[in-house]
Image (tube, helix red, strand yellow):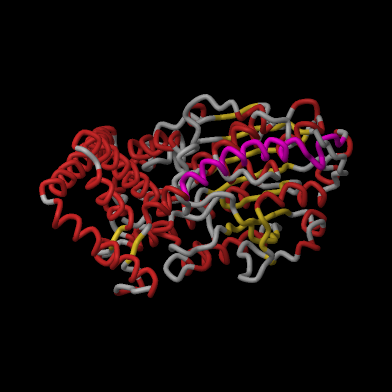
Amino acid sequence: MPNTVVELGPAKFVRLPSEGIIAAAVALALPRRPRIVLASVFGVVLGALTLVNALDMGFKQYLGRSFNAILDWSLLGDAESYLEDTLGRTATLAVSVGAVVLVLLLFVLLALATVRLSNLLARHPGRATRGTLIAGVVWITCSSFGVQLAGGVPLAADSTATTLEIKARQVKDTLHDEAEFQKVAKVDAFGNTPPDQLLTSLRGKDVVFTFIESYGRSAIEDPIEAPGVDNTLAVRTEALAKAGFHAKSGWLTSATYGGSSWLGHSTTMSGLWVSNQQRYRTVMASDHLSITKAFQKTGDFDTVGVMPGIQKGWPEQSYYGLDKVYNAFQLGYKGPKFSWSTMPDQYALQQFQDRVHSKKPADGKSRMSFVILTSSHQPWAPIPKMVPWDQLGDGSIFNAIQKAGNKASDVIADTTKSRQEYGKSVQYSVTALTEWLERYGNDNTVLVFLGDHQPIARVSGNHASRDVPISIVAKDPKVLDAIDSWNWTDGLRPAHNAPVWKMSAFRDKFLTAYGSTPHPKTN
């Protein structure tokens, strides 16, 4: 069984497995009781490997990587929550129960099947021995001469043993990576920088960092998604220019793909490559300086977070250096959910304006805001629509829009529709954010917005990059002059050949460009 959806095909299931031939030979040599025990164990191992292959398929399809047996079990709970928000509690309960039953049946039936096969071999030792020897000779011959089936699939297979080896190495590498990353996280080029030497050229500015969910390179370059998104970026660039705002844009390569947005957030802000959950926990427990924390450390900025996707306690607030955080339940929303998204981006931005941005910080401080937008989260159905800003109220205006929208189940099942609706969701989020800036931004506003990761492989493609767009928008020409050496593209749409950096490189480049002096911390 392959571990990717794209490799599924009849040829994969007519190969000669070396492990099966070896197991047959061993079973023929053993007495009855040890043979049955070994056959049962072999069946359970096959069940476990089949489960791992299925998880690999899902992770590669959604997150662009294989399942990690050490780190990824916790994500299954997140997947359940996502299904509940998308399909409802009843459907999620049915799916969860069905999945558990299928896994149990997989282990039990494969164990029973291998015991039955071993008994069949034992009842016909002569023919079984000849058959095993012939199969072994054929396997060695086909392996030696590289005999292949249709599509270049080798007839002689050893994929089970290879999978075991890969997973064992993955466990070893994961444990080693955890220890090494703890050392890396203790080294910080700006860890000992005095407050008066941080972000000196942004003092007095109104700085807003915004992540747009699943806003990836595919939205700008995919033939199905790009036309609408590119037109939106062009229209919004022109509208902002009329309001006095100008932008420069480039690309960042995200540390995650298809999901786990918090890895993209933390990588951008920390300057560390936070590519898995263990690294994330390490960073959140560290004092490695984040960009947002640097603003707080100056003592000249009030720091606020607006997180409509947060629906429970969020201890990460301390790491990010946010004085105040507004979660999904603190923004007064009375309208409907849009699948996973608790509220439309336009509403969240208006609440940010009313509760935060329109109010002057105390003690003559400036403000740094950290805003996470969620409307472009999969499954991209139903999608909100823009409404007049002065009619947003408590969000009830979105009831009719939500009811008239697509059903999540219809979009999930259709790849083309998923790609189309994904593009529309990005258009909505970009429009909402840039209209907010056009409407409420001032001479001191500096908006930095970017994607957290590419959408899932079913939408972005099986060989898509991990790049996401990033833009810096401001009225003050000095803000964009400070990054002139970056060679970013003018406007909201980065050119295809615009510079591409690892997402973890952004922190140091940003801090340096805006007046921060490195004072390294090494332990």
Across and down, in percent, residue 272 comes to 68, 44
Q: Can residue 28 be seen in the rendering of this structure?
A: yes
Q: Residue at x 16, y 49 (%)?
A: 121
Q: Nearer the viewer, residue 127 or 454?
A: 127
Q: Nearer the viewer, residue 317 or 162?
A: 162
Q: Nearer the viewer, residue 101 or 407?
A: 101
Q: Residue at x 59, y 52 (%)?
A: 254
Q: Quadrant of residue 191?
A: top right
Q: Quadrant of residue 493?
A: bottom right
377 versus 354 height, above or below: below
Q: Quadrant of the C terminus?
A: top right
Q: Is residue 184 left or right of residue 230?
A: right
Q: Is residue 96 left or right of residue 72?
A: left
Q: Quadrant of the N terminus?
A: bottom left
Q: Residue 329 colored magenta?
A: no
Across and down, in percent, residue 501 comes to 68, 58
Q: Is residue 379 left or right of residue 39?
A: right
Q: Can residue 349 be seen in the rendering of this structure?
A: no
Q: Nearer the viewer, residue 254 or 183?
A: 183
87 versus 137 height, above or below: above
Across and down, in percent, residue 67 comes to 44, 46
- What secondary structure characterizes most of the magenta part? helix
Q: Quadrant of residue 337?
A: top left
Q: Is residue 134 left or right of residue 174?
A: left
Question: What range of the chain is rendered magenta?
Answer: 166-193
117 versus 138 height, above or below: above
Q: Residue 177 colored magenta?
A: yes
Q: Residue at x 65, y 71 (%)?
A: 497
Across and down, in percent, residue 227 comes to 47, 69
